[in-house]
Amino acid sequence: MNEIDWSNLSFGYMKTDYNVRIYHRNGAWGELEISSSENINLHMAATCLHYGQEAFEGLKAFRGKDGKIRIFRLEENAARLQSTCRGILMPELSTERFKEAVLKVVKLNERFIPPYETGASLYIRPLLIGTGAQVGVKPANEYLFVIFVTPVGPYFKGGFSTTPYAITRKYDRAAPLGTGTFKVGGNYAASLRASQEAHQAGYSAEFYLDAKEKKYMDECGAANFFGIKDNTYITPLSTSILPSITNKSLMQLAEDMGLKVERRPIPEEELATLEEAGACGTAAVISPIQRIDDPENDRSYVISKDGKPGPVCTKLYNKLRAIQYGDEPDVHNWVTIVE
């Protein structure tokens, strides 16, 4: 292969050697198959194409200073995929099968795992789709589970720094009792327009308010939200946001550091009282927030007065990454070492 410039990787797709696949036919999951093709042969009437029977996950593998490869919290991704399957009536893949597939695809593509000092990682993308041909609106009779991997650079090209975000009132990402708690492609399609408008206006991303009352902070198009004040980590409690594994991990680390943790509705006006805030997810871990504008009401909530990430965000970010790369002890057993 051509030499990869590890330190200049973008957060994008690069062809690797293999992907793994498991088919679900006649009511049962088949054997794990290895493929070197980047294509899927799909019937034009497959339910994933017409009725959105599609779920995905995102997780990462890291190469440590000790040379070991670590995968972060894969059981949590397996559990979230199972929850999504229950939500849109797809067959659940057991945690054991999910783990088997993740370990296999990482091992097969080991040469694409970036070196420790680059700060880059191997992004792992599991995908589950309804492949059975159907014209009526009902679940498919056949499914395909695929995992591919791609090396990705650090999310922050300019280092760990604060950026501005904008509240959108014109659009909703998901309804309170809809599919917002599941990781389905439709939620991301629903965020594309608001996201593009926010980017064009110079913001990192859009923030949604709760769809029912437009009073409370929900989440970004692709990340959870948290705020820090009075030695407390506060994150929204909502029936329309995706349960982020990164956010769950940060809540635990905040507690370990002696912070109180609150999951509750966060009214928009409370933004004015926050000492720090961040958007969090697999890609960036934490994207610290400089300010959140509410353009439609001509309001701006400045969170970082000096424009720099706050001390708690910085500590949480460094701690989580240190666990992922094996630089600090994994006291919560979050990491799976690839043998």
Image: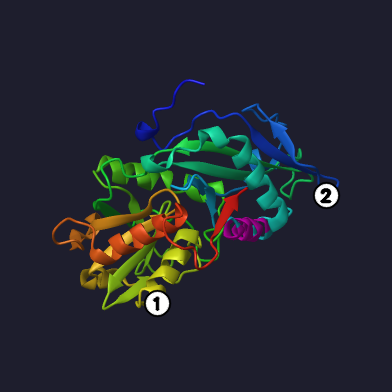
Q: Nearer the viewer, residue 237 or 78?
A: 78
Q: Amino acid at mark 1?
A: Glu
Q: Does residue 58 appear in the picture of this structure? A: no
| Secondary structure at numbered mark 1 | strand
Q: Residue at x 75, y 46 (%)?
A: 140
Query: What's drawn in magenta, residue-wise?
Result: 75-85
Q: Residue at x 74, y 36 (%)?
A: 33
| Secondary structure at numbered mark 2 | strand
Q: Does residue 319 appear in the picture of this structure? A: yes
* Picture quadrant of residue 167: bottom left
Looking at the image, is mark 1 or mark 2 earlier in the sequence?
A: 2
Indicate whether residue 241 is drawn in magenta. no
Q: Within 10 Å of the Cα at label 1, are there few (<14), some (14-19), or many (20+) other Cα atoms?
A: some
Q: Residue furthest top?
A: 2
Q: Residue at x 39, y 77 (%)?
A: 262
Q: Is 147 on the left-hand or right-hand side of 254?
A: right
Where residue 37 sits in the image (x, y, percent)? 65, 26
* Picture quadrant of residue 235: bottom left
Q: Nearer the viewer, residue 50 or 17?
A: 17
The answer for how far apart the CA atoms under marks 1 and 2 are is 41 Å
- Would you name the residue on which mark 1 appears? 262
Q: Amino acid at mark 2?
A: Ala
Where residue 73 sits in the image (x, y, percent)? 55, 58
Where residue 330 sits in the image (x, y, percent)? 49, 63
Q: Nearer the viewer, residue 175 or 63?
A: 63
- Would you name the residue on which mark 2 appears? 28
Where residue 31 sits in the image (x, y, percent)? 79, 42
Q: Residue furthest left?
A: 306
